[in-house]
Amino acid sequence: MSGERDADGADGADDADGADGADDADGAGDTAATAPGGFAVEPADPDDRLDVLRVLDAAMLETDPEVVDAAIDAGDALVARFERTGAVVGALVATRPEPERLRVDAVAVRRARRGRGVGSALVAAAVRRAERDAGVSVVSAAFDPGLRGFYEGLGFAVRPVDAATDATGRGSDRLAGRVPVNGRDRS
């Protein structure tokens, strides 16, 4: 996956993760948490695969179905579900590039549901899940400048991505965010 899309109304930006407005989302996967506006954030299950792919595709994110499958299997994919209908209105896919780092790889919310705290609730739930995993020391994300405030509002320290660490090797205006969890960060 190469980015994340406007998770919370930051029109047209890629690679978002954020956390405002979620009630105590359960990151362990046994219960769902109610997010603002009648949405619940919960771990994705294999039956959610197609919905997750559709939400990410609608946000024009490059999505590798194998990465989505692996995240679902590992419990590192979350969905925001409209409680009244059960429809998936948002999705977050995280990966573990190193065992101690959870990277928010993609997060997107259906256009009609943006700006209501759904993206923030998804990212907040991912951070809470990481806090319950003693092996994780940091949650990270890479995103476009338009999402700086979104990530900072969720407690992420933000810095520019330099050419040496940019996956393209060309440098860019993209930003990287990270939030330490479990009282440690091996920056």
Image (spheres, rainbow, N blue to C red):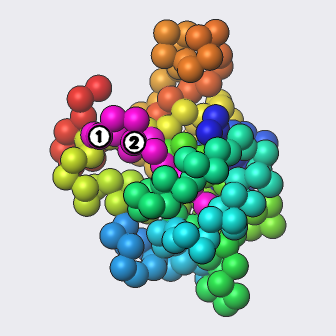
Outermost residue, bottom direction?
84
CA gap between label 2 and label 1 equals 6 Å
Nearer to us in this view, 28 or 45: 45
Disc sitting over residue 171 in the figure: none
Q: From this viewpoint, is residue 144 visible?
A: yes
Q: Quadrant of the N terminus?
A: top right
- The residue under label 1 is 99
Q: Identify which residue is drawn at 65% across, 30% down.
A: 145
- The residue at 48%/16% (across/down) is 165
- Judged left or right of residue 27, residue 110 is right
Query: Residue 175: percent from the left, percent from the top?
Result: 56, 27
- Image spot of residue 56 (x, y percent): 70, 53
Q: Is residue 6 magenta?
A: no
Badge 1 marks a residue whose secondary structure is loop
Q: Are marks 2 and 1 in contact (CB under 8 Å)?
A: yes
- Amino acid on which disc 1 is placed: Pro
* Disc 2 target residue: 96
Q: What residue type is disc 2 on?
A: Arg
* 94 vs 180, nearest the viewer: 94
Residue 71 shown left or right of residue 147 in the figure: left
Residue 57 is left or right of residue 17, and the answer is right
Part of the protein shown in magenta: 91-103
